[in-house]
Amino acid sequence: MKKLLLILLSITLVFSLVGCGSNEAQEADSSKDSNEKVEKISKEDLDQLYADPDKFKGKEVELYAKIFVPVERDGDATYIQAFGDPVNSDKNTIIAIKDPKIDLKEGDIIRVIGKVKGSFDGENAFGGSITAPTIIADSIEKTDYATAFAPAIKTVEVNEEKDQHGCKLKIDKVEIAEDETRVYVKLNNGTDNKIDFYSFNTLIIQGDKQYEAEENYETGYPEPQSEISPGVSTEGIIRFPKIDLEGKQAKIVSEVYSDNYNINMEPFTFEITWD
């Protein structure tokens, strides 16, 4: 915590210097070309930002991160430690914004736009050694895991519903991202009995390959409920490994079970295709 306090004091000093700039500096700034723009770090260079933050000092950056420790505040600003790669607990990032009341908390996924102050060498919240970029943020907004870390390369609009004995299963859409596939499902139990619908009983079959549902607790995706009472609906996202985008087609198979063993529920099967 002592290391973090030093970070906060350092960043606070930056804010105070910015807020108390001299008239001479303001006049000098006004004489600059009004069309001059701050150089922006490209997405391709973001990995280099974490390798050598000082190389990018003063440049504008846009990045996504997940806050992994409690947010700290003082009377002037809010201070954040976040991972640019939350799955691997990597790309530690120190962020400050001159807004002590901004609505942020541990666990939030954020989009940050700001300028690189430089590097910080020290300890993270867990006592490990880090070299992290320090960002003075102009804006921070909340977002979600898919937008930040797994944007869809291809979205397949399915909008198909199938009904067995009053149990209706619908696939809304399928999103194929760089490292995962997301299946958006909705189940309505219109029967008189409890229905069991477990994500691990859903498969994607593509050619001679079978993909099983997998969890990633960092995503925060809403999951469909597993046990659905009569008259109840549930919806959510079932996450899979990335399927072959060039395959152009796949089959989604879901096994659903009724507490009434006299009802024979066949697997729900959906054929999907895309260009």
Image (cartoon, grey):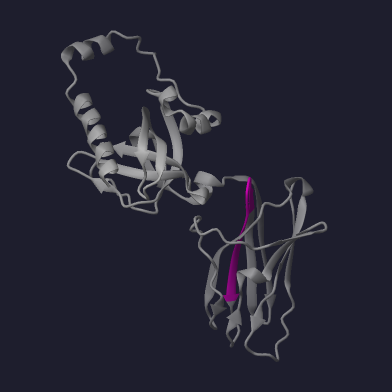
| Vertical arrangement, residue 184 with respect to residue 119, above or below | below
- Image: 27 above or below 221: above
Q: How many numbered marks have been drawn onto this rendered protein structure? A: 0
Residue 100 drawn at (x, y percent): 23, 43
Residue 222 on image: x %, y %: 50, 62
Magenta span covers which residues? 175-188
Q: Is 186 or 238 nearer to us in this picture?
A: 238
| Left or right of 34 on screen, residue 101 | left
Magenta region's main secondary structure?
Answer: strand
In this rendering, the answer to whether 144 lies above or below 13 is below
* Residue name at image x 57 percent, y 84 percent: 194
**Picture coordinates of residue 169 (x, y %)?**
64, 71
Res 39 quadrant in image = top left
In the image, residue 177 lies in the stretch drawn in magenta: yes
Q: Residue at x 40, y 36 (%)?
A: 132
Which quarter of the figure is the C terminus placed in?
top right
Residue 88 position (above or below residue 224): above
**At 22% across and 13% down in the image, what residue appears?**
25
Task: From the viewer's perspective, tell me whether residue 189 is left or right of residue 60.
Answer: right
Q: Position of residue 49 (x, y in %)?
A: 47, 30
Q: Pick out the residue farthest to the right.
A: 208
> As rendered, which of 5 and 275 lies closer to the eye?
5
- In this picture, residue 169 sits left or right of residue 130: right
On whether residue 45 falls in the magenta region, the answer is no
| Image-quadrant location for residue 255 | bottom right
The structure residue drawn at horizontal position 22% and vertical position 34%, both measured from the top left corner, is: 12
